[in-house]
Amino acid sequence: MNLAEGVQFVSFLVLSAMMIGAALGVVLLANIVYSAFLLALVFISMSGMYILLNAGFVAAAQILVYVGAVNVLILFGIMLVNKRQDFVAIKNAWVGRAATAAVCIGLFALLSTMVLATPWAISDLRPIGDGAIVAIGKHFFTDYLLPFELASVLLLMAMIGAIVIARRDFLPDDLPGDSPEPPVLTLPERPREAITAQK
Amino acid sequence: MSAGIDLQTSFIELLQGYGLTPGLAKVVWMPLPMVLIVGAVTVLALVSTWLERKVSAAAQQRIGPEYMGPFGLLVPVADVLKLLFKEDIMPAKTDPWLFSLAPLLVFIPIFLSFLIVPFGQNLLISDLNIGIFLWISLSSIAPIGLLMAGYSSNNKYSLLGGLRAAAQSISYELPLALAVLAVVMMSNSLSTIDIVNQQSGYGILSWNVWRQPVGFVIFWIAALAECERMPFDLPEAEEELVAGYQTEYSAVKFMLFYAGSYANLVLSALMVAVLYLGGWGFPISVSAIADWIGVSETTPWLQVITASLGIVMMLFKAYLLLFIAILLRWTVPRVRIDQLLDLGWKFLLPVSLANLLLTAGLKLAFPVAFGG
């Protein structure tokens, strides 16, 4: 084993440990903000894996799309939603948890059998490496044109939908039945009557 | 086009002359450019803080730093020393992990992006094939760090500042990437070296700024917004948000934000130079001059001069842009948040899309001038 292979092996181990640990953290931590940040770590370790596979473009795209867009969107979602709801303990909460665990374990078993059963034929072709951008572009506009265009149309629909939702021309000031209470002002700069007017 | 000096090959050959194996020689070489670039970037960022003080003083008819070293040149050093020895305060109700991690998440991608900044044909750390795309994707990590800083500070101003910074950074990423895409389309490559070489044919006349004037303006505005510079420094708007996401930070962690923002500014200026101002190219093509005085382009002393001239030109262009950015900061009022988002989404984005379309059309119509 020469130096390059050793570095690759160690990076592979570190990236795998990081990815699995972060993914477990996403699922198991109670704080949703931690989960969102750890999700970014999962995506970053995945892009490291792509770099190890000589796929630099895919790695950069992975960071741009998943870390830069999807994950930031999730964080925005978490931080901007201001829903105040009292926590009510649900009876028999363990049923839901048990069902979730069963589904997860079933999926895991299914995937592991798939991984073990598939005869993995490792291609001995040279990795395309630097020519990847050109090859990906050619595929997008020839044999993968339909999925590519469909994805574009889907994104366009999502964008128009977002604009329609954001463009509400009126905002309901106060909901009916929700009698507004005057806010209690405590700061020194609260409006008050002039001292001369009090007498 | 000559290859210019290749320090890596010469250095490795030198070490092999001393009896090292090629692999070992390469291992010895590898950290050298990285350490050099990190040191150089730190110095460049420090110089730009000094420039900021001096130019702001000139804009306000003051003298500015004067007594610390000649022309106050040692002020940045004193700044760093102060921040290093200051007590590192962490407010009681913060989230300690995220609070410490956030400055690093902002700082590291910026320094990592210098991987692809070329100062000459072979004077860069790594001529990656994805070049400029690496910079765009790395700069998209910054919003996560900003959100993390805002959230973990447990302070309403920090949270609002972090959200604003992330929103701004995302909004201006799109016009920035589209402007870069137009340049990439013309040079048929994402590599920074190819982008510069494509502009090097006729000296100043072949620079991209003449072929992409709209893209140049869009890129510059978007880069300023990405760096949170003055017309767009809403995340740190003092009157509204104290210091935005930096409010609770002090000492070394604050220094990371501070150094990161100036390093990012230097990086953006260097990128403008690479993409639109011919990179390390001299306004008159060096090979033309060599022809003219009758010296072969491969003469060693000429190559040394060319390489030094390249570095000087690159820094000159970057600092000219930096000077404009600083002048803008001290002369232009801040925009409002709705104006900022309007400018990004309703003006720059459509204009940059039209610019991209126009570039594609021109490339098909005039392949000679627009890199067919």
Image: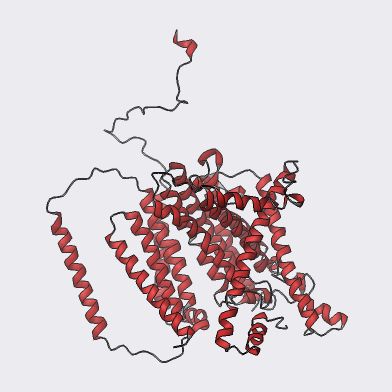
Q: Residue B296: image x %, image y %?
A: 81, 85
B292 lies above or below B36: below
**Among all residues in the image, which is located at the extreme right?**
B293
**Among all residues in the image, which is located at the extreme top?**
A199
Q: Quadrant of the C terminus of chain B?
A: bottom right
- Residue at x 56% of width, y 76% of height: B128
Q: Residue B155: image x %, image y %?
A: 43, 43
Q: Quadrant of the N terminus of chain B?
A: bottom right
- Residue at x 43% of width, y 44% of height: B91
Q: Residue A136: image x %, image y %?
A: 47, 79
A83 lies above or below A129: above
Give the number of marks.
0
Q: Residue B71: image x %, image y %?
A: 76, 50
Examine the rendering and report whether any part of residue A53 can be seen: no
Examine the rendering and report whether any part of residue A99 can be seen: yes
The one of B269 and A163 positioned closer to us in this rendering:
B269
The one of B41 and A172 positioned closer to us in this rendering:
B41
The one of B216 and B357 positioned closer to us in this rendering:
B216
Quadrant in the rendering for residue A96: bottom left
B23 lies above or below A20: below
**Residue A65 horizontal side relative to residue B38, left or right:** left
**Among all residues in the image, which is located at the extreme bottom?**
A124
**Residue B129 horizontal side relative to residue A17, left or right:** right
